[in-house]
Amino acid sequence: MADARVRGRDVLGRRAAAQRPARAHVPGDRPDRRRAGAGRRPGRGPDPGRGRRPALLPPQQVGARRAAAAPGAGRRARPALVRGRLRRLLPGAFDAGLQARVVHAGQAVAEEPSAVARRHPVLVAAGLYVADDATLDWLQAYAAAGGHLVLGPRTAYADHEARARRDVQPARLAEAAGAWYDEFSNLDGDLPVRAAEGSPLTPPESAGAGAGHVAGGWAGTRWVDGLQAEGADVLATYQHPHFGRFAAVTTRAHGAGRVTCVGTLPNPAFGEALFRWLTPGPGPWHPAPAGVTSTGATARDGRRVRFLHNWSWEETAVPVPVAVRDVLDGSEHAAGTELRLGPWDVRVLAEA
């Protein structure tokens, strides 16, 4: 089994904060030192195109990127990501062939939750560590309005003054999520993850059968929130003698939408699998061939523009789902034909 040691000491119980029974601290544990580095920040950035994209919310801001999901299968998702743990989540969205948008929390909560849910069917709060009550209530309303809210590690842990909340974690969202935690740990190595029985998550073909296999397979990295399902479905678990008692990913319907909790920072293979599940219908240009990314945008005149990039040394062909004109050389390509891309080639296409 891959070595997933806990850095320093093991897991901290949060008996007072969570107001639930918790295991005693591991001998020699130092809660004061453990809390010191609990919350870190992450990134941001816009995305102009429309389509099935996730949005991400950052730790202290709301961000958008890779995203989500089941509710709203007929809509094109624009995943949103929250700043905080973006560097660990964004590669998963990219590898899944998705466009993502990072939005500041203040931008998101300034709009009606239902409006954001229509535009971004998936919203990922990657590590929204510091958040006030109004922001957390808005996130719950977003899910109730039909959005798929994805909560990453440490989201909702502290209030607007960065004080650890006494609520059951994730604060103000645990009931909607159908999952909670009062133990957490950092990691020195990758922690193997596997799909739970009946889970819609699809394991990578390269994953080995051994219980401790990680290379090419799923793994959690750096951090673990010990998720306990209480009404939620468990999608993935850890392969470990201690952490195996916790869920790695849970999901639960809430109102017209859904809340999914991810208790660790996924490695690229695990992140890609998550985003493929979150956005099952990303649009007619997906899936693209291996090594090819397909992104779209809306020009000022209202036309849709498609960008194809071949990130490999091999020539490849991309099926064309709609009639397009190559903006660079003027050639036209009918729907149903194939467009050749050379090594490291780029095509800019105007859709008819």
Image: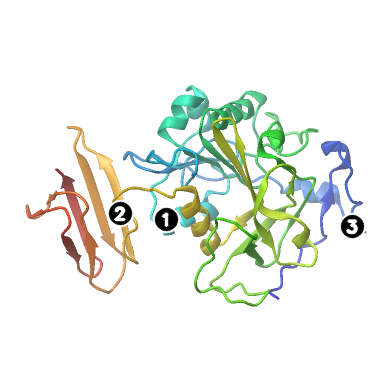
Residue 26 badge? 3
The crowding category of the residue bearing disc 3, from other C-alpha atoms within 10 Å (few below 14, some 14 to 19, many at least 20), is few
Q: How crowded is mark 2: few (under 14 residues within 10 Å), some or many (20 or more)?
A: some
Q: What is the x, y in percent for residue 108?
A: 49, 29
Which percent across, then down, holds residue 298?
25, 38
As helix, strand or loop, the secondary structure at mark 3 comes to loop
Query: Up-down: is 64 above or below 145?
Result: below
Residue 201 % position (x, y): 55, 57
Q: For the residues labelled 1 and 3, say whether their Cβ atoms are less than 8 Å apart.
A: no
Image coordinates for residue 268, horizontal then vertical, percent: 52, 62
Per the image, the residue denoted by label 1 is 94
Above or below, 134 against 56 in this view is above
Find residue 163 and report its image quarter.
top right
Q: Can residue 223 be seen in this view?
A: yes
Nearer the observer: mark 1 or 3; the answer is: 1
Image point (75%, 55%), residue name? 246
Tag 1: Cα neighbours inside 10 Å, few (<14), some, or many (≥20)? some
